[in-house]
Image (cartoon, grey):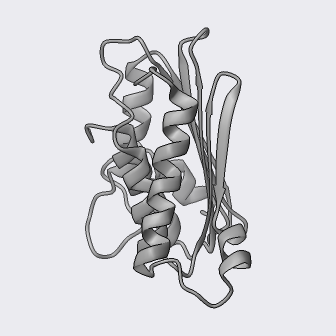
Amino acid sequence: MLPEISLNILDIANNSIRAGANLIEIVIRIHKVTNRLLLIITDNGSGMSKDILANVEDPFFTSRTTRSIGLGIPFLKSAALTTGGSFHIESEPGLGSKISAEFVISHIDCMPLGDISSTIHALIISNTQIDFIYTYELDDKSFQLDTRQFRNILGAIPLDVPEVSAYIMEYLKENHKMVNGDFHI
């Protein structure tokens, strides 16, 4: 398994990119009282047929021709279920896919969230032609980063220009710190 939830997010988002998505939404909802972390990744990529969807959770199945196994979705599912959480995937050809994974935070096998700021930053800066909506919630506090809003403000200035890239990273770090306070997973 991948050692951090953020690395699983990176892997699943890259699946979305390979599926032709130009909008990827990543939501992390943490509820301390219920002891849960919910991850939702939604894309508008090519989606999956019923046959592929029926097999996508099998680690020895992949729709890619460059390798014979696909581990991203099975790893995420296993990581969530191991904690006593849940996993769900839905997809429609031509409409995209939605993956939900819920983790029980206090379970001994719950992996840490990891460096989510760097993960989201890397996705944005490495895929400047794709829009990302990232929402992070901890109980009643939250923030959102929507690259479409950045594009509206910046006009023709690309998101990977060093000054813009640095601002995006700082925005992520500061907002995570503001929302998290002294809480860490």
- 56, 106: nearer the viewer: 106
Residue 89 visible here = yes
The residue under the point 55% across, 43% down is 175
- The quarter of the rendered structure image containing the C terminus is top left
Up the image or down, 48 lies above or below 26; here it is below
- The quarter of the rendered structure image containing the N terminus is top left
- 125, 127: nearer the viewer: 125
Q: How many marks?
A: 0
Give the x, y percent position of residue 121: 44, 60
Left or right placement of residue 184 versus residue 20 in this view: left
Up the image or down, 11 lies above or below 108; here it is below
Residue 102 visible here = no
Left or right placement of residue 153 versus residue 127 in this view: right
Up the image or down, 160 lies above or below 57; here it is below
The residue under the point 38% across, 61% down is 62
The residue under the point 45% across, 79% down is 160
Up the image or down, 153 lies above or below 55; here it is below
Give the x, y percent position of residue 138: 60, 27
